[in-house]
Image (cartoon, rainbow, N blue to C red):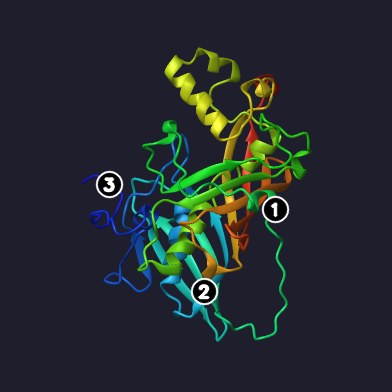
Amino acid sequence: MGERSTLVRPPAVDESKAPIENALELTELSIIGPDLFTNTRELWHPPGARGIYGGAVIAQTLAAAQRTVPADFVVHSYHCFFVLAGDSSVPILYHVERVREGRSFCTRTVQARQRGHAIFTVTCSFVRENSGGALAVAHARPMPPEALANPPPDDYEDPDFLKGRDDPFQSFRSRTPDDGDDWTSTKEPQDKKVWQWVRARGKISEEGGHKAHLSALAYVSDSYFIGTVTRIHGLWRHSLKVDDVAKLGPAKRKVFDEVNAWEGYGPLESYRGRPQIGMMVSLDHSIYFHNPKKVRADDWMFTEMESPWAGDGRGVVTQRIYSRDGTLLATAFQEGVVRLKQDEKAKL
């Protein structure tokens, strides 16, 4: 018998839930062992990627851990490593270990496994709500005023060339004050920022509650994240060469130009002579949840991404995620492999 993408036959899609809730649904395997879960539905494998979308495993490991903590505890810290590329055609087993049970904090580790091998490991910490005391220090970096004043409209619809994609999230690229009409900036890479608005499609159900909103935020936190390095350096990220774009047929060229413009990568001419990405994969990912109960992932959230450093074939990126009203919801960090395609002559 051939391999299948889930251990249990997936149920019908629950129309009362948002697409992201259906995509991230877990099946508990208590008949096999305690604190053991698996993906209910096949996970998304982005075209051209080495494996499944990392945000899906980030979200499902968080969801699995959340099922094992008391109701009055919420996640505040999440740290994971991408060990091996996940295969969307094979079920994932999520093993949760209850490392610590404290009065104010509890700790969980989760290991995602396929074919007997760990593909992903995470340690996350949960805090009991309102355990910090009546008096507490508090501050937060404010949301950029230009972004706060210009959220996408509630009735925003995807452009025609994006309709029909099976994507549980909507994205809306936003210009920073330093971006020109062609999305270029004269700032140094370490000083550039990338702005984006995101929201889950549909409405997250009351049954899913705040845990579903947090899993959804974790899912989208991996979107375009390490790709920030390619944006701020103006790197060519496609498999075909810049000069070969002109050889595309009219229909494919039209889609290429529309997607490139929508994603804000700037004019094609600006990439002539620029280095080309040879390999780009995530190594690790961390999220600090600052206001977990205020997360509403089905409303517009603003993300600001930047990179303090890149070198030796790696890059580090940071991301701040805000609610539409300017509340800082979370801060995320990621390191990834960012290798350039090497000159063939250099190998001789």
Q: Is residue 323 visible?
A: yes
Residue at which label 2 appears: 74
Residue at which label 1 appears: 145
- Compared to 237, does 315 lie above or below? below
Q: Secondary structure at mark 2?
A: strand
Label 3–label 1 contact, CB within 8 A: no
Q: Position of residue 62 (x, y in %)?
A: 47, 64
Q: Position of residue 225 (x, y in %)?
A: 59, 47
For badge 1, the amino acid type reads: Pro
User: In which quadrant of the rendered image does the C terminus lie?
Assistant: top right
Cα–Cα span, label 1 and label 2: 29 Å
**Mark 3 or 2 closer to N-term?**
3
User: For this rendering, which residue is in front, 157 or 2?
Assistant: 157
Q: Secondary structure at mark 3?
A: loop
**Residue at (48%, 80%) from the top-left corner?**
72
Q: Residues within 10 Å of mark 3 (few under 14, many from 20)?
A: few
Cα–Cα span, label 3 and label 2: 36 Å
Residue 322 occupies quadrant: bottom right
Residue at which label 3 appears: 3
Q: Residues within 10 Å of mark 1 (few under 14, many from 20)?
A: few
Q: In the picture provided, is 69 more to the left or to the right than 25?
A: right
Q: Is residue 120 visible?
A: no
**Residue at (66%, 86%) from the top-left corner?**
134
